[in-house]
């Protein structure tokens, strides 16, 4: 049963081939047996999962139906879950049990999903490798010596290893799409405001967005359907009708205009990845798409702009973790200043401290105009580039990552090299656009992903293109050895 996709599980439950409880118990046993190899879970919620599975079976027995009713999933460990540890993979929140459910969690629970556990991540979602977690790095199921990508690496590794069919994740600068690419999954970052951020512990509030990680575009459509929608509790949530994402999956790609930004294919891109991107373009052309070269001239400024804006917002958001109200508190503080300093110094890891310091510097008197304000101006230019491009094309296609998954520890002493792995993904966050990564092949037995970007609220178009591509390719069906 562990090889079933979310869509296949929905059909199996509807046809009474198995119950949600049977499926849940089988996957929980698989998690306990195999997850020690990859460290993809922080908490496994056996009792909650079985209780939810029984409730879902009772709802089906009473005549209720639904694609997600009884479907097992996992939540990235920054979504608040009532009564369950929500740690953000940090010592700072190691003892924190949320008193409420995040909107994403409550919406999916109402749809009938079963929560198997909380997945590992980079601490406070700050990282591109899932190595900064207080609970240790996550290993890539395709090769245990390599990273799975971050910050949603736990969700990605768990789905890739067939420990569960799908999981929630978040994307601040590529943290859904990049791990999807490095583990051969489909990952979707929706339009900013499409999915509620309420109850999602913030990293950078103007960039963070929740979305689904699964093996197929069809599965992402099902999970996004349950997650999306207006939330009055979230001031950044947008009141826009939610379409039926599954209804348009099989639409024709005849005449679809695909743009290839020339800036994507420069010296920093592994040529073997470039070859697979071009191969995916040819498959889409066979399906009727029309391809043309475009330009995103301000893309070169995206990395410096992002790494001013994101740390600045992080320094503000993380100021609440001070050892006073909740979370980690140092022992025997001498005075209030000592309490603040030691609680934060001992509770936050090195990468989180680095970004807080960078952000505080960028926002300090005398530097705000020179750094933060300039970065926001660049952000507008990047958005304008995309708006101009979408006058000529329907979607933009390119590599998700410039390189293959690197070995664990390889970039620990060079954080800038790790930041550069987000070069193709961060522009969508700066502009607030939806983006999707889909499996496109392998190099040296390591997965490669292709990224698609679309105009605001055109998630259905991205899912349609990815689904049609997955109907004529089999990259998304391949599983790592031993899983």
Image (cartoon, helix red, strand yellow):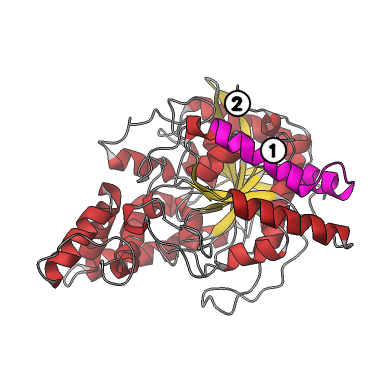
Residue at 49 percent across and 64 percent down: it is: 200
Q: Position of residue 220 (x, y in %)?
A: 68, 50
Q: Position of residue 461 (x, y in %)?
A: 71, 54
Residue at 37 percent across and 55 percent down: it is: 94
Q: Is residue 209 left or right of residue 310?
A: right
Residue at 67 percent across and 57 percent down: it is: 224
Residue furthest to the top: 444
Circle 2 residue: 480
For residue 215, say whether it is visible.
no
The residue lying toward the viewer, choosing from 42 and 247, is 42
Numbered range of the magenta stretch: 6-34
Q: Is residue 62 left or right of residue 370?
A: right
The answer to whether residue 203 is magenta is no
For residue 437, say whether it is visible.
yes
Circle on res. 26: 1
Name the main secondary structure of what is drawn in magenta: helix
Q: Position of residue 348 (x, y in %)?
A: 28, 54
């Amino acid at each position: 049963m562990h090889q079933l996709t979310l869509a296949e599980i929905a059909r199996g439950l509807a046809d009474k081939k198995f119950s949600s409880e049977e499926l849940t118990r089988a996957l929980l046993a698989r998690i306990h047996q195999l997850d020690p190899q990859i460290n993809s879970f922080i908490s496994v919620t056996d009792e909650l999962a079985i209780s939810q599975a029984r409730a879902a079976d009772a709802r089906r027995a009473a005549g209720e139906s639904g694609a997600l009713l009884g479907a097992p999933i996992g939540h990235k460990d920054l979504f608040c879950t009532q009564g369950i540890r929500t740690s953000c993979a940090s010592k700072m929140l190691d003892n924190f049990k949320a008193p409420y459910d995040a909107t994403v969690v409550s919406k999916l629970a109402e749809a009938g999903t079963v929560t198997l556990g909380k997945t590992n991540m980079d601490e406070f979602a700050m990282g591109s490798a899932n190595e900064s977690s207080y609970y240790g790095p996550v290993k890539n199921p395709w090769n245990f010596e390599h990273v799975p990508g971050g910050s949603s690496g736990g969700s990605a590794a768990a789905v890739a290893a067939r420990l569960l069919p799908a999981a929630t994740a978040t994307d601040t600068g590529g943290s859904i799409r990049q791990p999807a690419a490095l583990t051969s999954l489909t990952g979707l970052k929706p339009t900013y405001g499409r999915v509620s951020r309420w109850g999602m512990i913030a990293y950078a509030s103007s960039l963070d967005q929740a979305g689904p990680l699964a093996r197929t575009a069809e599965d992402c459509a099902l999970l996004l359907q349950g997650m999306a929608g207006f939330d009055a509790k979230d001031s950044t949530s947008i009141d826009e009708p939610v379409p039926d994402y599954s209804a348009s999956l099989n639409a024709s790609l005849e005449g679809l205009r695909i743009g290839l930004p020339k800036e994507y294919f420069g010296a920093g891109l592994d040529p073997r990845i470039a070859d697979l991107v071009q191969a995916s373009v040819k498959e889409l052309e066979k399906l009727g798409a029309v391809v043309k070269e475009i330009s995103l001239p301000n893309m070169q400024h995206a990395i410096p702009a992002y790494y001013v804006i994101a740390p600045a917002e992080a320094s503000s958001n993380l100021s609440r973790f001070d050892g006073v109200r909740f979370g980690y508190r140092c022992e025997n503080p001498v005075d209030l200043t000592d309490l603040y300093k030691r609680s934060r110094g001992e509770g936050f890891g090195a990468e989180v401290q680095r970004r807080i310091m960078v952000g505080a510097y960028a926002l300090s008197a005398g530097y705000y105009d020179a750094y933060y304000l300039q970065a926001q101006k660049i952000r507008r230019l990047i958005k304008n580039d995309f708006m101009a491009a979408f006058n000529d094309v329907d979607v933009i296609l390119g590599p998700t990552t410039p390189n293959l998954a690197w070995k664990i520890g390889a970039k620990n002493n060079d954080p800038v090299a790790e930041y550069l792995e987000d070069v193709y993904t961060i522009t969508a966050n700066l502009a607030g656009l939806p983006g999707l990564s889909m499996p496109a092949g392998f190099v040296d037995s390591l997965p490669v992903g292709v990224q698609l970007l679309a105009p605001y609220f055109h998630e259905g178009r991205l899912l349609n293109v990815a689904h049609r591509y997955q109907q004529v390719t089999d990259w998304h069906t391949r599983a790592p050895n031993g899983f």
